[in-house]
Amino acid sequence: MTEKRYRFDTERRQFVTGLAALPLLATWPGHGRTQNPAAPVVPELRGIRFELSVGASPVNLTGKSAWAKTVNGSLPAPTLRWREGDTVELRVGNRLREDTSLHWHGILLPAGMDGVPGLSFHGIAPGESYLYRFRVRQAGTYWYHAHSSLQEAVGVYGAIVIDPREPDPIAADRDHVILLSDWSDEDPHAIVRKLRKQSDYYNLHKRTVGDFFRDARRDGFDAAVADRKAWGRMRMSPTDLADVTGLTYTYLVNGAPPAANWTALFARGEKVRLRFINGSAMTFFDVRIPGLRMTVVAADGQPVHPVSVDEFRIGVAETLDVVVEPAERPYTIFAQAMDRGGYARATLSPRSGLQADVPPLDPRPILTMQDMGHGGMAGHDMSQMKGMEGGCGADMKMPAMQHAGHDMSGGMIAHPASETGNPAVDMQTMTPSRALDDPGIGLRGNGRRVLSYADLKSTFADPDGREPGREIELHLTGNMERYTWGFDGIPFSKADPVRLNYGERLRIVLVNDTMMEHPIHLHGMWSDLENADGEFHVRKHTISVPPGHVRSYRVTADALGRWAYHCHMLLHMELGMFREVRVDA
């Protein structure tokens, strides 16, 4: 199928599904204060005691009736508004026919309150409830979601906003939560079964014969043939940017599909804080507001030095707060999926019912060998690379493979013995980049000022100035054909816990040996990202590692107990990219 036909189908489906969703959405309970009456309104709950009930609700987000798993009957779940320093109690009841749980993403709390079945507790059985109780030790933008099976993919997620005990240093006249997510009418377990049988099932962007002749005219026949041979040896596709795409996903803002046009209101002259949360199961979003600069002021709930940008990429589970100063006209909040297979859309407007132009999707990006960390492999022995016997043979002089500004000085990297001869590993990064200033594939040189990790700098000094006493290196691994994932080629089911000593400061180094980007989340403790010189850079709870990259960060093991550590791409986690981290006294 050609790209042209695919894009037409996608846009038509979003148009139809948006219209179909409106009657249902208009009946949702209205507790908001600034919403378009035709758009859904997400309930907001404040205080210190909360009653939450996980159940099933009928929805129609695509023109077809389906069932979602919801909290208090709402998709997304109610926004919880806490205050730093308070002790909150949340009683969570289960009205499902299966176990459930709620995890408070990025929140520092005792291990028993973290909400991960098998580590924190046994989960919440049908008909039962569980009382979470903990002191709120931080402020900012966070979120919560189920940590049971694939319930997060079908609606069990919501926003958390924590007001600081002291006056908020981020000045804004009003704020809005912009919770991005992806929705499919397909059962997520059915999606997994399809991917296990055919990992590129949802990839309709694969290159065609026409693409080959275009590349041959541009780069020369031999170069085009060499490129196809290289990808063929790896048994991979350079268009494989997302496992699950707009073929089945409809992308939502606060539970609304694009045509519902969820609207955030503002008054003339106001500064508006937008709290972006990527609560999707499998989708990275590239976000911009055409005609409006955004000042990034917080990342993963923690304040950063303000930086003005036109666009940013937000990985699954990450949060970013921005402040904007709109003129008195509507603006489109445009969040396109990283593979350009669809988009979520909302409007920032002085009045209900207005809308601005929706920009077209950007051209679909194509992965290169250098994106995969093979930029410096000429002359090296590639015999240990699965599917790349004899080397990939790619021509590194091809124009599409140029990466300005990348630090490739790290040279060849060593790989753990567990990857050798391992059918769960189909690729190894050889010369990964350690640079933080790469905005990411599809965003380089697009004429817009795009945020990168290098721009995010905490407003505070290293909270634990000790040099790390030891280092743990883990490789993110997978086999796309088998659709299996793990660390060091070992799935969670066969892995020993990662053991930390209470009170120690250590460094975790992640090497991405796959062709996918992975947002890695450590529960219960902060991840203090380092720059290329090994200096403290920014505090986060989720660190995204693009293919062909290394990320390193420091952790203070100040929370006793058993904690989850995993990729936040939900299907990657479920299929093995998960570890238990145990902090022992």
Image (tube, rainbow, N blue to C red):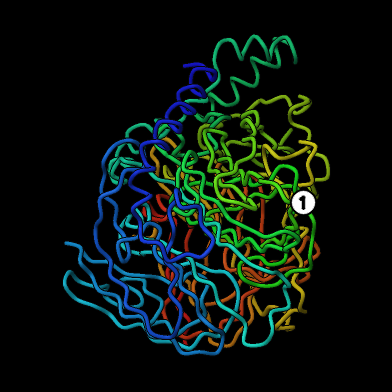
Q: Residue at x 16, y 62 (%)?
A: 97
Q: Is residue 152 left or right of residue 205?
A: left
Residue at image position (75%, 51%) is 327
Residue 215 falls in image quadrant? top right
Furthest residue in direction right, as rendered? 405
Q: What amino acid type should be assigned to the residue bearing mark 1?
A: Arg
At x 48%, y 38%, the residue is 259
- Residue 447's spot in the image, x, y percent? 80, 37
Q: Position of residue 274 (x, y in %)?
A: 63, 60
Front-most of 568 and 124? 124
Q: Which residue is mark 1?
A: 293
Q: 323 or 500, which lies in front?
A: 323
Q: Residues within 10 Å of mark 1 (few under 14, many from 20)?
A: some
Element on which disc 1 rests: loop
Marks counted in the figure total 1
**Residue 377 x %, y %:** 71, 37
Q: Is residue 281 visible?
A: no
536 relative to 214, above or below: below
Q: Nearer the viewer, residue 446 or 515?
A: 446
**Rendered view: 82 above or below 415:** below
Please provide percent x and percent y for residue 64.
29, 37
- Dividing the picture into quadrants, the one containing residue 221 is top right
304, above or below 452, in the image: below
Query: In this picture, is 220 found above or below 415?
Result: above
